Amino acid sequence: MKPWPLHLAWILLGCHGTFGMAQSKAEPAHIEVVQPLRHQVFQRRFDVPQLSHPHHPGGPAKGFAEVDCVLMLEHNSEHNIQFRIRQSLDEPLNEIPWKQAFALPASVDGSRSMKTRTTIAVPAGGWYTVEFRVMLDGELAGQATTEPFGVGEVFLVAGQSYATNCNDERMQVQDPKARVVAYDPAPKDLTPKAWRTANDPQPTGDQSDGGSIWPVLGDLLVNCYDVPIGLVNVAVGATSTNQWKTDGQLFQRMIEAGRQIQDFRAVLWQQGESDVLEKTSTATYVERLVEMRSQANRAWDAQRPWMLAKSTLHPTVYNDPIGEASIRQAIEDLITLHGFQRGPDTDRLDGLNRGRIDSRRHFTGLGQRNAAAMWFATIAEQLDAPTSSYRAHVAMLPELHLREPAWRSSTVHRESSTLLQDGENPPTARLAFPAATILQIRTASPPADDSEGFREGVHWRLSENRTTIVWIGPVPCETLRTDQLFVPEGSPNSYKHRTGNPKQNLLYAPGNWFHQRNLEITYQRAGEIPTAREKHPLRLVKTMAKLRTGSKLVLAVSGDSISTGLDASGTTMSPPYQPGYPELVAAQLTKDFGAEIDLVNRSVAGWSIANGLADLDKLLESKPDLLIVAYGMNDVGRRDPGWFADQARSIQSRAKAARPELEIIWVTPMLGNREWIHTPREMFFAYQEALRQVVSPEDALADVTEVWEIMSRQKHELDFTGNGLNHPNDFGHRLYAQSILEWLAK
């Protein structure tokens, strides 16, 4: 079985550290899993259909869910909770590494027990189990395993009898793993709420006991998408939209069901016959559904689409073409409104699809299967619609810590460094700041089982000044020797010319060459940590307003090769497949704000700011709300900061004239190799100052030049490089993203 991408084994922190009171080591700690429930399905998010194939680098982008796990623990114990996720019963447990779980105490029940909540990101699929263990002083004190659960597609079914069990044939789930399940949000007896295999009859609100279309639909979806399907059915037969109005019991039951499952893909609305009987007008039907969806969105604090079936015929009861046409037109009108989507036209099913006149049933078994197939076609059209590729990277964000700028955080996460060796001395890796504690060292492209990293005293030691890692064990990756850095003209992996010595070339290797020679070090900083610079409250006001309301934001990028993502591991097709900074910024914004980010990146390798100016009209055709302009690396060799500022002012004036509401984030470049003739170090600071004079009061400057200077004071030129000269590595792209995201805070 293929291992998961490393970024899918993270924990959302409820709080830091452990909790509880002391307990004797001899007394075992009791641990019980309260949630997830058996066969519970969690709605996946951030799936990217066009990248969901098995050969996509980093694995199929089928999305993930943040799964809440609730444990019952003895609250009089100092405990350390660990977990591991098992993908199938066939997966050997000894091959699954344990991960640290940071948990939030949820409640204490007055006894010796307390509920504890931890949230785990789990990729789409299932059935899964999660094993938890409690460790006391390094020894096992308690252990428990969740019931099987899944991450897939969840649908809330509402409407009347076509959506309940009023059809001829009781359908059975055919999936061998029974991955089509139903949830009853309001069981009639005293049994606890539970998910069960979705065999007919469905647990609906009307106690109907015939067959439905939903097991067949679930099987079709499982067969196509290979994820579990959850159905929550609140439909009630013989009900009109008048009975579903927002002040009624049916609507409130639907709201409560949505709250219980928390997240789901869509409401599947199959209803209309009772409104034909009641002679409901087109306008009234539209008005009622619009109000229902609006109130539901407020109650659920989320925008959920409603997929509307055309379901107006009831041949065993009436024949009313005019009344049917009125409701069918209402469905057409609703589909043109935001938030409503086209469902199947099941009115088209006739003849052998319909129940006998004397049965008062809606569909025969054939009709049930065909109606399910029609629902499948409309749902698949939505699930298969291409979406922004950056969404595939949302799952890795918690490991990247883009909201914790490395230059002013108490913990520096995954700072990169090469292992550099001078003569016979041991290889060393450098830190940007003195370290109080080294938390982890790993290679930048670690194997799937490299969860523990390397150990102090066995593999490495920290220098007395606490800024250098001295490698004392077997080296984890190739080292760089100081005599490799400058080589004669014509040497492989080199580029001309070295400043002051044109007969020498510099070490140059685009692609993943440097990535394979990078360590990543996570550590807690020693000494005083600088406070965050106060941001001007009037900058990027319009952009922030869009983000905070969850509105669509068109984010355009104009830049050089750095802005295309070179040489991030994602562009070199190397694990962990991190993209360049534009995709990281878009992924973080959509994760934080729930907004749709339309990323338009017109950056081209080799471009100067003059090229960006020439391309401006094409870029503005995308109607951007926010523009990131990132040039300088290919301009500093010109040694003319005044010219650079003039070009920037031209971009600014022309862009604002065309789009007065547009806001701009200007980005200064990273520092190029000081030994390369084309990146004179002093020019970076001259260009930085020139660009500062261009930025208008409503816009912002992401000063990567300043960040690079701070981070590299105690580092080597090659510690943050992706090619040896003028491209960032993965960590460098994260510095770019952090610098931009500081202006776009939650």
Image: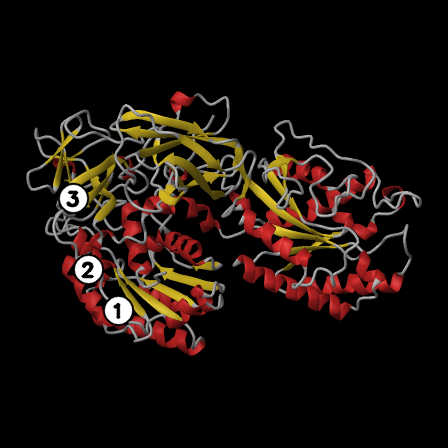
Q: Identify residue for label 2.
A: 531
> Residue 625: percent from the left, percent from the top?
44, 68
Residue under numbered circle 1: 644
Query: Is label 1 in a helix, a strand or a loop?
Result: helix
Give neighbour class at mark 1: few <14, some 14-19, many 20+ (Cα, 10 Å): many
**In this rendering, is residue 372 above or below 322?**
above
Can you give x and y, in whole percent of width and height, for residue 52 in the image? 53, 41
Residue 325 occupies quadrant: bottom right
CB of mark 2 within 8 Å of CB of mark 1?
no
Which structural element holds mark 3?
Answer: loop
Q: Quadrant of residue 353?
A: top right
**439 relative to 635, above or below:** above
Give coordinates of residue 144: x percent, y percent: 42, 28
In the image, taking residue 370 as reference, residue 90 lies left or right, namely: left
Mark 2 vs mark 1, CA separation in Å:
32 Å
Q: Circle 3 is placed at which residue position?
A: 431
For residue 318, say whether it is visible: yes
CA–CA distance in space, label 1 to label 3: 33 Å
